[in-house]
Image (spheres, grey):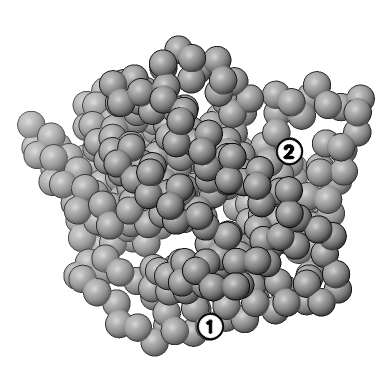
Amino acid sequence: MAVLAYLAAVLAAIFWLSERPRLEPVFRYLPPVIFAYFVPTISTTLGILPATSPVYEWMTRYLLPMALLLLMITVDVRSILKLGKTAGAMVVAGSVGIVLGAQVAYLVFGRWLPDEAWTGFAALSGSWIGGTANMVAIAESVGTPEEIFAPVIVVDTVVGYGWMGVLLLFSAFQPKFDRWLNADLSAIEDTNRRLAEIEAVRHPSTIADLAVILGLGLSGAIVSVILGQKMPTLGDPTIISHTTWAVLIVVTGGLLLSFTPVRKLEEVGASRMGYVALYLMLTGIGAQGDLRAVLDAPAFFLAGVLWIAIHALVLIVAARLLRAPSFFIATGSMANIGGVGTAPIVAGIYHPAMAPVGLLMAVAGYILGIYAGLGSAWMLGVLSGL
C-alpha cells in the first residue's frame, strides 16, 4: 500500500506542477507523462522503491483493463475506420523494422556476445512485436537459457521503455515533423473535431456519475480477468494467453458499449478516469526499471539501441511514403514494442481522441507478434550458424 501511495502521490505532484504557470515552458516540451514514467524509475535506481513488488503486477492486471474499458466506450467508430489502412500499414512497418533491426543488431554485436545470444535476440523480437506474452512464447520455442534471458529482460525494460520516453518527448515537436513528412492530417483533424463536439457538451461530474464510472471500470476489469482465466490458451508456443483473452474481452465489451447510451458517460469524464488509471499504471511500469542494470549488459544494451534506431528509420520511411502523420510513427512503434499497456498512452499524448486507435493497433500487434517473432527467430538461427 505504501508503494501504491507513493506512486499515486508522484503522479498527483507531477500533474499539479504541470498546472503552474511558471512551469508551463517546461511541461510544453516535457509532457507530464514523461515524468510519470521516469520519476519512479529514478526512485527505484536510488533505492526509494523496490524493483519488484506485488503492486506492479496488480496495477497491470486490473488498472489496464479498467482503463481500456473506459477508453473504448468513448470510441467514435466512424472516425477510426477512416484511419484503418494507414494504421494497419504502420503497424506492419513497425514489425518489419523490428525483424530487420534484430538481424542487423545481431550481425554487428554478435561477436561480443555468447554463442546462444541469438536465442535472446529471438525472445526480444517476440516482446517488441506484441509484448511480454510473445517474448515468453518465443523464448520457450527456441530454448533461451536463463543466463541469456536475464540481460534480455533488462534491455526490454530499459531500452524499450526508454524509447517510449523519447516518443513522449517527441510529441512536443509533432507539428514541425508533420510538415516535413507532408502528412495528410485530414482524418485526424476530423476525429479531433468530433472530440471538440464532445467537449462542448461536457458538464461537471456528480457523485453519481463518478460512482457509475468507477463501478463500471472496476467491475469490467474483474469480469474480463475472470473470463480470461476461464478461456483456453491457444497455440504451442502460446499465441493467445489468458491475459490476451482478458484484453480482447474488455476491448470487445467496450466497443459494444460505445453503441449504447453508456457512451454518454464521456460527457462526465469517463475517458479522463480511464487516463488516470492508465497513467497510474505507467508509474508502476517505470518503477520496474533500474538504470544501474544497463551496466550489467552493455553489449546487449548497445544492440538494443541500434535495433530501435533501425525500427524507427523503417517507420519514418513508411510514414514519408504514406504521408502518415507522426502520430502513426509513435503509435505504430509502441503498438509493437509496448503493446496494449503503452500504445494507448502514447496515442493519447499525441492526440487525446486517438487512445482507442493506439489500443486497436496494439491488438493488431498481438496478432502479428507470434508469426513475425518466429520468423525473426528463424533468421537469427540461420545467422548464428554462419
| Of residues 149 and 163, the one drawn nearer to the viewer in this rendering | 163
Q: Position of residue 280 (x, y in %)?
A: 69, 56
Give the residue at x 55% y 15%.
Answer: 176
| Distance (Cα) linking label 2 and label 1 | 31 Å
Quadrant hosting residue 261: bottom right
Quadrant hosting residue 14: top right
Q: Position of residue 152 (x, y in %)?
A: 40, 46
| Of residues 215 and 48, the one drawn nearer to the viewer in this rendering | 215
Query: In the rendered view, does 343 fall on the left or right side of 241?
Result: right
Q: Quadrant of the N terminus?
A: bottom right
Query: Which of marks 1 and 2 precedes in the sequence?
Result: 2
Question: Which numbered marker is on residue 311?
Answer: none
Query: In the rendered view, does 337 fall on the left or right side of 70?
Result: left
Give the residue at x 78% y 76%.
Answer: 211
In this figure, which residue is indicated by the disc labeled 2?
32
Q: Amino acid at mark 2?
A: Pro
Q: Residue furthest bottom?
A: 230
Q: Residues within 10 Å of mark 1 (few under 14, many from 20)?
A: some
Residue 34 in sight from this viewpoint: yes
Give the residue at x 46% y 30%.
Answer: 186
Give the residue at x 33% y 51%.
Answer: 365
